[in-house]
């Protein structure tokens, strides 16, 4: 019933997440924007699952598991970087810059 | 006269977009995180309206309940709550917004995207499945049947993530 509308909403959410990644410098906020993008994709999966069977919902389940693992490891990395650099500002984390 | 379901749907869809926009524009990371929680709740409502109530519950439990608490915990641990704005400069903001709008224009055809009629379920098929197999059963059945191997690999992934997080977070092993 809402398939087309949901696809538009998820496209808008994905775009907002992308803009957030481009606009912010705080590593944690950028990480949250990535979570927002994952959620937009989940919304697409569920919208198609309504017409194509529950396989889409099962993929959402897997995406959530991967997102949880990613959050745990990613935040541990951010903590390790903070311990080293005393900042989470990506402007100052430029070890690989030539 | 729109149906009450459509009114609820559009209210929460609009709220999700507004809350996500607030999330990326707030200067305080703590406020950003709380607006993201709001977005996740709204998306959970959309999941429920789209006949995926179990996924909606998982969204609240796992995303809003567990992952976001982890984020808030790290923000407080690093004492970022009072940090001043971390938005990039005016030029970078303009370029980022233009790129984002371009992406949205590229995604425009998705509004008319739809699977071919031949592979679509008949209308109401998912509804009757929810009634007959239960809200959890309709997802759990295929998960432990045709998707058993991916499910086991997921458990391996989570174990690896736990080990990785502990190794990274500990000062000295």
Image: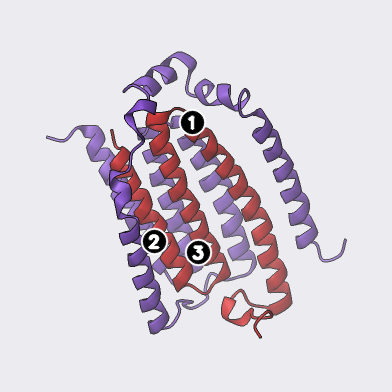
Chain colours: A red, B purple
Residue at mark 1 shares a chain with residue at mark 2: no
Where does the C terminus of chain A fall, quadrant-wise?
Answer: bottom right
Circle 1 is placed at which residue position? Answer: B54
> Which sits in the foreground, A41 or B52?
A41
Name the chain letter of the residue that bears numbered label 1.
B
| Distance (Cα) linking label 1 and label 2 | 26 Å
Circle 2 is placed at which residue position? Answer: A16
Above or below, B83 relative to B41? below
Decide if residue B16 is in sight here.
yes
Q: Secondary structure at mark 2?
A: helix
Residue drawn at (75%, 48%) of the image: B160
Decide if residue B120 is in sight here.
no
The count of marks equals 3
Name the chain letter of the residue that bears numbered label 3.
B
Where does the N terminus of chain A fall, quadrant-wise?
Answer: top left
Q: Residue A52, how many percent across, how many down?
A: 41, 30
Check contact, mark 3 vs mark 1: CB within 8 A: no
Q: Which mark is residue B67?
A: none
Disc nearer the start of the sequence (3/1): 3
């Amino acid at each position: 019933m809402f398939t087309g509308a949901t696809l538009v909403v998820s496209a808008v959410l994905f775009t907002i997440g992308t803009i957030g990644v481009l606009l912010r410098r705080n590593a944690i906020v950028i990480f949250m924007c990535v979570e927002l993008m994952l959620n937009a994709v989940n919304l697409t999966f569920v919208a198609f699952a309504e017409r194509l069977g529950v396989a889409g919902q099962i993929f959402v389940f897997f995406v959530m598991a991967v997102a949880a693992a990613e959050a745990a490891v990613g935040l541990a990395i951010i903590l390790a970087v903070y311990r080293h650099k005393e900042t989470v500002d990506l402007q100052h984390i430029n070890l690989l810059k030539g | 006269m729109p149906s009450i379901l459509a009114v609820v749907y559009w209210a929460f869809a609009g709220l999700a977009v507004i809350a996500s926009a607030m999330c990326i524009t707030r200067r305080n990371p703590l406020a950003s995180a709380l607006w993201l929680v709001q977005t996740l709740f709204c998306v959970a409502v959309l999941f429920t309206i789209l006949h995926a109530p179990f996924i909606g519950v998982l969204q609240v439990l796992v995303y809003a309940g567990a992952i976001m608490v982890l984020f808030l915990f790290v923000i407080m641990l690093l004492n970022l709550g009072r940090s001043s704005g971390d938005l990039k400069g005016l030029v970078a903001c303009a370029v980022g917004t233009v790129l984002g709008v371009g992406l949205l224009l590229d995604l425009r055809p998705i509004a008319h995207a739809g699977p071919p009629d031949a592979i679509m379920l008949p209308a109401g098929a998912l509804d009757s499945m929810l009634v007959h197999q239960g809200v959890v059963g309709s997802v759990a059945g295929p998960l432990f049947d045709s998707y058993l191997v991916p499910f086991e690999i997921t458990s391996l992934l989570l174990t690896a993530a736990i080990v990785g997080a502990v190794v990274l977070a500990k000062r000295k092993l």
